Amino acid sequence: MSSTTGGDSPDESNVNVAGAENVISVGAAVAERISATVAKLVEDKVASRLAGSDHTLWGPAAEAEAIKRLGWLSSTLVSAPFVDQMAELRAEFLDEGITHVVLGGMGGSSLAPEVITATAGVELTVLDSTEPGQVLAALADRLDKTIVVISSKSGSTVETDSQRRAYETAFEAAGINPIDRIIVVTDPGSPLHESASAAGYRIFLADPAVGGRYSALTAFGLVPSALAGANIGDLLAQTERFQPLLSDDSPNNPGLLLGAALAAGAPAVDKVGLIDNGSTVVGLGNWIEQLIAESTGKQGTGVLPVVLDAESFEANHVLADVLPVRLVSQLGIPAVDEIQVAGSLGAQFILWEFATAVAGRILGIDPFDQPDVESAKSATRALLDNRPAPTAPNFVDQGIQVRGDQKLLQGVSTLSGALRSLLSTLTPQSYISLQAYVNRVAHPELAELRDAFATATHRPTTFGWGPRFLHSTGQYHKGGAPTGVFLQIRSIPDVDLSIPERPFTFGQLITAQADGDASVLESLGRPVLVLTMTDAVRGRETLLAALADAYRSA
Ligand SMILES: O=P(O)(O)OC[C@H]1O[C@H](O)[C@H](O)[C@@H](O)[C@@H]1O
């Protein structure tokens, strides 16, 4: 038997009836596995306490952070004024012929607008990269019709600061006053708030009581999305209709069920496959990925999100350590060991946030901090300060420079041998992390490597574009279970771009980010292989052939 909950009708047309939106259906085996955990959550009144912003739910060590991080529970109220404000501003820009919106921001400051606008079918250029070719391409795209939203909660993120500098200079060079074309979203009192006020930029302040990855329904999610043409009034209304369901101390509460499903199987089942199985929400998995990975991947535990589609290997084979979650448009009966999640985007934002906070309590961690993100940032800063000469590759094979530590590359002289050596470290609990510090607009085909690695190894495989993933799964890689096997894929940029008034270029920045993260992972004893393509156009084919060869001769 499987149980469906969240209301009494699977029909999306019923969402206007408060509490009548079905959102989750749990397979029988999963229901059995989580029933004791759910019963305990009900007994402890976790749902009503969380809905009432009880900051003691995660233990004494987490209280200080939690007390200032529960504002997302009231985002629909706090954000209501943005609906009219943004509609007016958008109309003003359209009148001036400004039709193209760019968002410069990382992680929690870009992932929600990406999903909101993709689901609404409106265009938003998300520049969450430091790859010089990708930055140059964005700068060259319709600058005369462009408005740029610079979003950073802390106001000190190096990628976002560099993007702002690049756009300021580009606008000035084109005879456009940046003050007319750059909008800033940040927290009150951040360094960006101060500098943007001094410069005279239009500023939207976000609710400081909401952490970055929980900020979908604050200014961070809403301002760029509304400017791009998404209906944020509808989005907030979807959340408002659904949210009351989450406060019930009931074993059918979808937030408790999902939270328990995410966390109750750990450490044996410590990965969740987020399978887009015809969901009407476009790209939701990437937003959920940051939320779960950064919130739970710490103290050697956590849940690893693996973003998949219906054709992925992991979506079609039972892997003992992976819980498949199918994101569907309408609930059906799930396989016994799977769950299905549906619902409007507004419902899903709050559902997953609530469930992640519940999962944090079950895992015994603080779901609102990200203690291991800083290590890669400081390694990057040190590299940018000292700028050491690049290390020589261990060897070059088929136009690919291969780097790795002694343990991995001793006696190895071919690309396929290097892959074989890396993949020989896999255990039945391992995952593979593919990290491409490459221009994703020019080389989207590299993402196809994910399926090839999962199919060849039968291990869950994540794919992230660098430096974007550093603000998402990056926390889990360092803070979560030590089961990751890491493959960095880089290209030698054929262009570079200076960062105005900074002593380093975009090319030097992305290299330092990749080097910095690799060094932190290596220092934690994780296997890391670094492959640098001298010809990115042939990169995918060369790597696929080497992977096939590695397995043929294994
Ligand atoms: O919005 P910002 O302060 O620029 O931060 C962007 C991102 O930076 C870090 O990586 C944090 O770990 C993320 O949670 C955050 O979303």
Image (cartoon, rainbow, N blue to C red):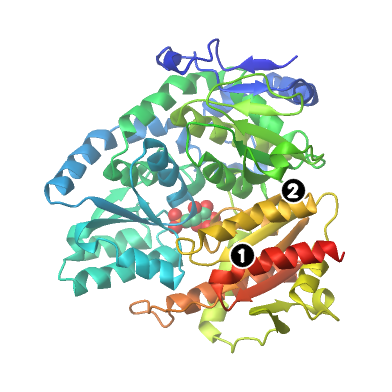
Q: Residue at x 46, y 56 (%)?
A: 106
Q: Amino acid at mark 1?
A: Arg
Query: In the displayed structure, would residue 214 be above or below residue 196?
Result: above
Residue 301: give its label: 2
Q: Quadrant of residue 309?
A: top right
User: Residue most toward the top?
Assistant: 8
Q: Residue at x 56, y 48 (%)?
A: 290
> Looking at the image, do the residues carrying marks 1 and 2 touch, with CB atoms under 8 Å apart?
no
- Which SS class for mark 2? loop
- From the image, tell me which residue sits under label 1: 540
Mark 2, other Cα within 10 Å: few <14 / some 14–19 / many ≥20: some
Q: Amino acid at mark 2?
A: Thr
Check mark 2 vs ligand 1: CB closer than 8 Å? yes or no: no
Q: Residue at x 24, y 40 (%)?
A: 86
Left or right: 126, with 534 as reference point? left
- Which SS class for mark 1? helix
In which quadrant of the rendered image does the N terminus lie? top right
